[in-house]
Image (cartoon, coloured by chain):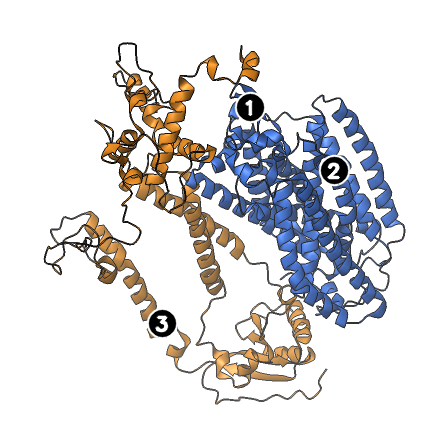
Chain colours: A blue, B orange
Amino acid sequence: MSALTKSLHPDEKIKAGKLGQKMTMAGVGIAVVFLGLSILLGATHGDNWKRFLYAYVTGWSYIASIAIGMLWLVMLHHLTRSRWSTVVRRIAEAMTGAFPLIWLAGLGFILPVALGYKDLYYWAHPDAHNAALNPTIVHKAGWLSPGFFALRYVIYGMVYSGLSWYFASTSRKQDVTGDPALSTQMRVVSGPGMILYGFTTCFLAWDVLMSLAPKWYSTIYGVIYWGSGNIAAFAALGLIVLWIQRNGRLTHSINEEHYHDIGKWMFSFTFFWAYVQFSQFMLQWYGNMPEETNWYKYRMFGEWQWISIAMLACYWAFPFVFLMSRWTKRIVPSLVFFAVWQLVFHWLDMYWNAMPSYDWLVASHGGASIVQGPLAGNIALHHVGFTALDITVWLGLIGVFLAGTGRGLRDNLIPVKDPTLGLSLAHEVM
Amino acid sequence: MSTETHIEEPALPAQGELYGYLAEYDTPGELVEAARKVRDAGYTDFDCYSPFPVHGIDPAMGIKRTILPLVIFGGGFSGALGGLLLQWYCNAHAWTWNISGKPTWSIPANIPIAYECAILLSVFTTFFGMWAFNKLPQVWHPLFRLDRFTRVTDDGFFLGIEARDRRFDADKTKTLLQEAGAIALEPCYYDPDPKTRMMPKWITAFIVASTAFALIPFAIAAKARNSHSAEPHWHIFPDMDFQPKAKSDTANDLFPDGRTNRGEIAGTVARGWLENDDVLYHGLENGQWTTGFPKTHRDGTPFVVDAKLLARGQSRFNIYCTPCHGYDGRGQGMIPERVKALGGVWQARNLVEAPQADGKGGVVIQMPNGQLFNTISNGYNTMQGYAAQIPADDRWAIVSYVRALERAQNASTDDVPADQKGAVQ
């Protein structure tokens, strides 16, 4: 019998129990082992920690984008009064609960920059402020200064943590009081919250990732970072939900209908990513202005060409064609395959954004040797130069993310007194 | 479940043959349950009617998932290929047009149009495919003859079993529908007039006519491609092609001199264009080439030769002068280099050449500032004048930079301050 609304199954296990601690412990373990290993590898890499910090920015952008994507889901849920997502919302809230820890971990690259480290962001290097060589960087000098940069980082962290804290704690309050007015309140907050979120996410992407190539211009960059992050965020949500179900919780409440919707979001952001990425590419390709095309020049030709082609084929074409079908999203092992696949290639996306800036040109200018930074546009200069460090830092930071997420997996794993819970439990994808 | 089931034998005079039975149910849930029972009884020719999509009705009725998505994929794919083909045909095959040396057929530029064509054809396939698979429109459907059925767009949930179903049996079918909880049940008959059971003629006529009209532009294009004509081509939007406005440098009957361009009125000067400062605009001081610099800029601010002015001069020089004269001013810019590469001999004037002992050479270095300014403004030999491109202030900045360049290119160790001489030597 099909019904518009259902009540929780009487045998349903909705209490997290030790599940959260388990995830936190595992996360801490992974973080300690892999970050420890990374510090060893970084120290012996012999480039004054430069590779370590580039890998760190890559990995940090990765975990931050996942939490940012889930915060979007939580706010969208309230804003549109969604039904399907009520059963997974508590888990999404737990994932956004990782923000404070992620921001603490981010100090790993923010603090060195704030304290005068010059080899990560070219704009922090004194040679970048040579007006004859880099008029565009001099133009941006007010924005791209270490102190202001660190201050903005703190503000972004406060915005994200504040929003995630508000939605998670109000939702838990409703578990106790069952007051439907709290849903209305969250909906009202999520409107302006979404606007604040949009600005913060764009600025974060410009600051952390895009300013690695400070001479380059793109206004859509923040949207691309966000879209790409949401692919990974929904993939991670699917995997965490499955893990919780494998541990005997929520086995009756979340079914293939909800997995199907998670898969649909993954699919739509897979296409969205390609759409906005191409929007950026085509304008710059058509405009053909050196300060814009340089960024693509060393990604499209030379060693990075193969990474770019791999991105197009594996991060877009393959999952796009297969996730289009209904069954690939409804059969859980198939969805798991694509979730893991996209989580791996999301890392490659972050790597593709950050790492080509690693190689800096040092040239002679006016008789002196001057550091010209990553945007010299010399194809031969930019190497993929893959190292074990790139992976270990990434895994270590995933540990940080899991440790932060585990904190939120406590008490009820489902918003038990949410007015839309019944609709969500009975959700069917037509 | 309602027990007040009542059967109204023929609601309308039984004019045609029996179409089937229509049962009404109270809620969507009861409709789904009834559909399941009818399916389990082995019926296949039946349908459910509701004001909105009902969750779970498809499996309850035993309907397989539609193949429409696959058809849409085909439609979208053909759209993308068709879009690419269109652009290839137009740009690279039928009418190749060289735009700044770009390739005539270029994939990145073609993606947006291919993408839009894919969307267009997917949407068309979705829309028309849905109608076709549902065998719509059926404005002549016999159920519309029942008054009760009008509520299907409001609050009625109906299940109709057709008489052509091989399991149909007037009594058994009625009992089945009643047992499934029908709150009302009535038979439905065809209209006796067979014409009303077919698509109305005017719909067919409309489809044929609009298809024919849609082909007209293609027919015209095909004719135009295969014939010659002395007639001027058609103007579909004449008010866009012939706009009521005067364009510069054209003939115009309105004015006695027959020209659209209106010059200045005799004895007047446009605001800001007086240009009565001989030094600033002509490089002349008391009828002679000046050796100094103007006293003020165009905007009246004092003219000071400082690092800022030199930097401005450098930037203008690098833009306008270096293609011929080179960055060092020695006359070996990219254009002379190109001439050399093509086997020719030509060199631009060496701006920084020092005069020989016999007085030869060093033309520019010996020029007064005013003459140098005049050369930049009005040109010299094959060099064109730059007054139109470079404002007077900037031309003077270039003069100051050329003077600096001359000094720098002919520098000796004596120019180095005494306390830093050691470092150079």
Query: As shown in the figure, which amino acid type bears the numbered disc 2?
Result: Leu
Image spot of residue A214 (x, y percent)? 57, 37
| Disc nearer the start of the sequence (2/1) | 2
Q: Nearer the viewer, residue A361 or B155?
A: A361
A199 horizontally vs B114: left or right: right
Q: Quadrant of residue B360?
A: top left
Q: Residue at x 59, y 58 (%)?
A: B65
The answer to whether residue B92 shows anywhere in this view is yes
Q: Quadrant of residue A322?
A: top right
Where is B373 relative to B405, above or below? below
SS category of the residue bearing label 1: helix
Which corner quadrant holds the C terminus of chain A? bottom right
Mark 1 neighbour density, 10 Å: few (under 14) some (14–19) many (20 or more): some
- Mark 2 touching mark 1, by CB under 8 A? no
Between marks 1 and 3, how big is the CA–CA gap?
68 Å
Which residue is denoted by mark 1 in the rendering? A381
- In the rendered structure, find residue A111 and report the number of the disc placed on it: 2
Q: Nearer the viewer, residue A212 or B265?
A: B265
Image spot of residue B206 (x, y percent)? 33, 70
> In the image, which is nearer the foreground, mark 3 or mark 2?
2
Image spot of residue A182 (x, y percent)? 76, 69
